[in-house]
Image (tube, helix red, strand yellow):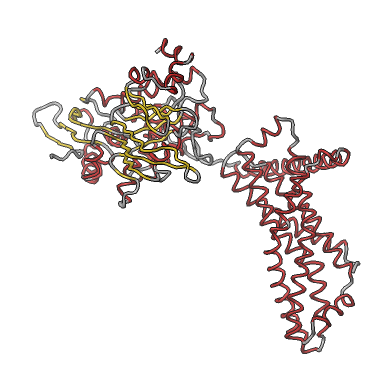
Amino acid sequence: MADADAGAGEYVIEIKDLVNTVGQGVILHKDLEFSVRRDEVMSLVGGSGSGKTQLLRVILGLKRPAAGQVRVFGVSWEDPSAKKVRDARRRMGMLFQGGALYSALSVYDNVAFPLRERGGLEEGEIRGIVHAKLAQVELEPSHGKLLPANLSGGMVKRVSLARALALSPDLLILDEPTAGLDPDRSEGFVRLIKRLREEHRFAVLLVTHDLDTLFELTDRVAVLADQHIIACDSLRAVRGMNHRFVQSFFGGERGRRALQHG
Amino acid sequence: MPSRDAALEIRTLAQDPVPIRVRASGEWTFRGLKERELELDRRLTELERQPPDRVAWDLTAVDELDDTGAVWLANALRNAQHIEIAPRHREILKQISQGLQVPAERERFDPFAGVVWTGNAAAGAVEHLRDGVGLLGQLTLDLAGALRRPREFPLREFSAGIYRAGVTALPVTMLVGFLVGIVLTYLSALQLKPYGADFLVIKIVGIGVLRELGPMLASIISAGRSGSAVTAQLGVMRVTEEIEALSVMGVSTTLRLVLPRVLALAVALPMVTFCTDIAALAGAMLVSNFTLDISPAAFMQALPREVDVVNFWIGIGKSAVFGFAVAFVACHYGLRVLPNTDSLATGVTRSVVASITGVIILDAAFAMLLRNVG
């Protein structure tokens, strides 16, 4: 089982010599190197416009880079074997910033969707998993009937998380998971992710501007600036860096406040 | 490397009060279960038939347990009394067991479903009508307001609407008009030639095209082209909350979005009809030249003699009304789209169907009203 062996390697995401362009050849990332270990929470931070979302799109295989290697679970998105690519895709879950729930499907059907698409399970079994996932994100079975349009922002995030977790992923990618949530809910969301990770050891790639979330969850921080990952290390090491963005990001008033709490 | 796929080991201890000992090992995951799916399923089903107090489960050798594995085990362990399990797998098994206990929603037979459906449909129709009348009223007020304060009239949207619904529609409507002109003339000529009533063809085609076909073709194509586009655009604006943003800024949605579109199509459609008429008559002229030996010059001379000019004006007048109707229906449906993709799709479909039907009904009404004219 070659793909299982590759997946059992040390890294879930490996990026080498990445060159990424936007529009008509404007270089966004150049010779970028980045990797995420299989049992860690990696946070990706960077100023607005530094290309965090574009990097995520490349990692997710939604965008083809201009040059360089991107491997997720040891599989390149360009791999000729469609099965390998599909298997790798099914091992990761994505929480989009806006939720990206299917607006025409109920909450229940949204969470059941990836399970039904993967096949191999009967409807009764799917029901068990869906309700377990809803319970994990602290939703009631009765919420299953609601349509996304009738959900609050926090509920959209939780349903989206339940959907991302439906296939028991080995890698969870979270794009601004606490954006738009009140501090209580953000705190709850962070606790939820922590608890889920204790139960099911998956890797997390977290993109966030929320320093509290960052301090609570992260093992390592990657800083995206000047077209590179300028640092990828523990929070303590990164905070000490002498770089304009790092200083203003962690050393600003909000950063200091979060540090006092964290 | 030993196989890590899910495995089940069953031993029977004859003298023991709990004689059946089951030991699960390996990866009880979606991938790990795949290899021996049928065998495991069969053995688990057999175990389910045993009295629960005679089976002891040992799950401590399970390396990995995911939701799929937990579903399989939870089903088998439903009534089990003797279970040993690694602490790290306890939580997931418990969650899945609880998930499986949630009863499925069943559609219950409701004897009054038909009545409820009819009631809802009637209420929906009334609401539709009320919204439609409301929109028409608001549009009239906005138009009156715009006439009093011409500076507020959204001129840019209006001219853009004329360009989009008029100029860009010309190639397709003129092509269709030309072809219909050819077909109509050819068929009429075939029927009328034996009777020597060649010039009657000009009358039939002239009246047919100018009074009926020109406006109908133009408005049906516009309903499919511009009507659907308007509904989709307003619908997406609803989905992305752009319409709400306009309202919050105190900008009237009808003045900014509906009025320019409705007026633009009401102005553009007569012009499109005019061009369609010309294309259809050109097609008719071409066929007359070859099949009936009526030269283009003779055709041109005969046309005003055979066809009263009022027919042309009726056609143009009708298309202004059709244009208004198509755009109005499209806007009405566009504003009713709910923020989900399904509603957008149904909205666009219904808008096109309703506007084409509406145009045909209006045409029938015009035919009755103007039966003594021209």
Pick whichever, A26 or A43, lies toward us: A26
> B183 above or below B332?
below
- Percent across and percent down for residue B225 are 66, 56
Q: Position of residue A156 (x, y in %)?
A: 50, 30
Where is residue B297, by image quadrant?
Answer: bottom right
Name the residue nearer the viewer: B193 or B273: B273
Residue B208 image position (x, y, % from top left): 79, 71
Residue under the point 27% across and 37% down: B29
Residue drawn at x 35%, y 21% is A238
Left or right, residue A6 beside residue B339: left
**Residue B50 horizontal side relative to residue B129, left or right:** left
Q: Where is residue B196 shown, x and y percent of the image?
A: 81, 89
Q: Is residue B77 left or right of residue A25?
A: left
Q: Is residue A233 left or right of residue B63?
A: right
**What count of labels does the image hold?**
0
Work out whether residue B31 or residue B80 is closer to the camera in this orientation and state it: B31
Image quadrant occupied by the C terminus of chain B: bottom right
Image quadrant occupied by the N terminus of chain B: top left
Against B81, residue A166 (above or below) is below
In which quarter of the view is residue A197 placed?
top left
* Residue sitting farthest toward the left: B15
